[in-house]
Amino acid sequence: MSKRIKIKALLESNETNIDVTVKGWVRTFRNNQFIALNDGSTNNNVQVVVDFENTDAALLKRITTGAALSITGTVVESIGKGQKIDIKAKEIEILGDSDPEKYPLQPKKHSLEFLREIAHLRFRTNTFGAIFRVRNSLSFAIHKFFQERGFVYLHTPVITASDAEGAGETFHVTNFDLDNIPRTDTNEIDYKQDFFGKATNLTVSGQLEGELGAMALSDIYTFGPTFRAENSNTTRHLAEFWMIEPEMAFYDLDDNMDLAEGLLKYVIKYALDNNREDIEFLTQRLQEEEKQKPQNERSEMSLLEKLQFCLDNDFVRLTYTEAIDILKDSTPNKKKKFQYLVEGWGTDLQSEHERYLVEKHFKKPVILTDYPKEIKAFYMRQNDDGKTVRAMDILFPGIGEIVGGSQREERLEKLEQRMDEMGIPKDELWWYLDTRRFGACPHAGFGLGFERLVLFVTGMGNIRDVIPFPRFPKNAEF
RNA sequence: UCCUGAAUAGCUCAGCCGGUUAGAGCAUCUGACUGUUAAUCAGAGGGUCGCUGGUUCGAGUCCAGCUUCAGGAGCCA
């Protein structure tokens, strides 16, 4: 038996009249004669031609959708139209049967909702094969980008003791017997008896620890899972998601924005260069999906065009104050089409406002900066106007906020004052404040939501479809 | 969590104003055909109409509650 070759490599080589072994799963078996075999290396199947008249009927019956096969045969030019080459099978081994009465995937279109219920099998579809190969590339490209720039990949803890960051509801971490939780004399939960001797939770952000690393290593990034116990039921939120959080010493907000924009363009280009076929497939998929929609809801650009456009154009940079002025003067605001009318300075922007700026007004990615301090986190550097902080959010069409970042407040008094105002316990964050006591310097960083990036690059609409096993309220299956 | 909508065969869906035995396409099975491209043709099997309760002579259909899902909003990445 010849050495196994991956289907991607086989289809890319132009050799014929050689013997090869391929292993994979049956997508369809047509006419008792043609096996479409897929091994996940590419969306394209290889067509295996079976000499059914000289093959054991019992074996033929076991070639069913989903079955795992090992096939050895000769590569020949295909007589049919759909493909360049066929494999004329000499030897077919069934590695794993797949009962057609029970196997839920059929050679037909399935709804994304249905596939979400069988997430353990959805990898075997064209759409999800493409998505997860693209996800893999993006993940690799992120490391590549940072490594080429001398950043240190820092593993910040998944379990943390402080809930001081205010980045949302947390999941508790404990090894208490939940039916018998130790209590103090005053009937409060006695965390001293818990595993860590204090209340702990899953991290909502590695930023604060990341800053500690940057204050010695200069440039670091984290890339790991993050957890939010928010009861969010949207196409853009997960309870467990992956986030990239770079943190750079001696960066100001402009350096920060340059890095973020550079990173996004780099990884999108990497995916376009290395996953062309998958992105072309996803572009087609999106086009088919949009055919169902009314004309005015369809996007002007195809997925491929949208990604290329993103590479070819600078992101628009403007301040929160400028954005408010644009929104106040906008047609939907004047005609009262917004559900929340923009009247004054100081309130947070609603999704509809962000979408207007990105999708209607500028029609390209937008970086908003210098938000009112009241609507942003305590650690962001205060501007001299006393009203705004050096924050930046990158807004993408169809996704909304994909990056949130800021220049950090490095001045101890200013930081402590802000923590007092916002009720952040300084004693719990003594270690964070130490970086402002010893060798403080200007620095900045941001958080990039990885799944939101994958959403954008794959053109998918629901974040639950771009992570292998999504965790969200009322669902932790698989 | 809030708003809107949905839940009928393995999948996608139809089922009108409450009325006999709940339908279609695809999938599956059986047979035919054999260079197909989600093969084709003929036939067959397949249902606790999401759950609980209510109204009614009678409920897939009307009402209430619950569960889950989808889309939008909030929280955010």
Image (tube, rainbow, N blue to C red):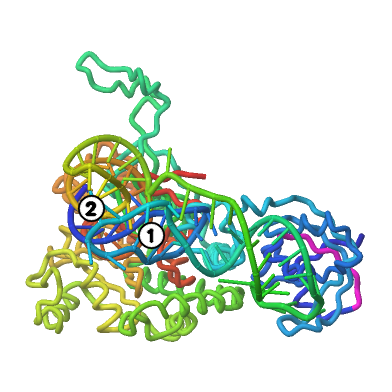
Spot occupied by residue A436 in the image (x, y as percentages of width and height): 30, 50
**Quadrant in the picture for residue A182:** top left
Kindly identify which residue carries mark 1.
A447
Vertical comparison of B68 with A12: above or below: above
Residue at mark 1 to residue at mark 2: CA–CA distance:
16 Å
The secondary structure making up most of the magenta span is strand
Vertical comparison of A278 with A445: above or below: below
Spot occupied by residue A426 in the image (x, y as percentages of width and height): 23, 40
Q: Which residues are magenta?
A: A17-25
Q: Is residue A411 visible?
A: no
In the image, what residue type sits under mark 2? Phe
Q: Residue at x 36, y 35 (%)?
A: A172
- Do circles 1 and 2 both sit on a common chain? yes
Spot occupied by residue B39 in the image (x, y as percentages of width and height): 66, 74
Q: Which label's residue is closer to the chain start, 1 or 2?
A: 2
Kindly identify which residue carries mark 2.
A378
Q: Residue at x 81, y 84 (%)?
A: A79
Q: Is residue A101 visible?
A: yes
Is B59 left, or right, of A332 in this rendering?
right
Q: Residue at x 89, y 67 (%)?
A: A53
In the image, what residue type sits under mark 1? Gly
Where's the N terminus of chain A, which quadrant? bottom right
Is A56 left, or right, of A231 in this rendering?
right
Q: Looking at the image, which is closer to me, A135 or A335?
A: A335
Q: Secondary structure at mark 2?
A: loop
Q: Looking at the image, which is closer to me, B71 or B46?
A: B46
Vertical comparison of A319 with A67: above or below: below
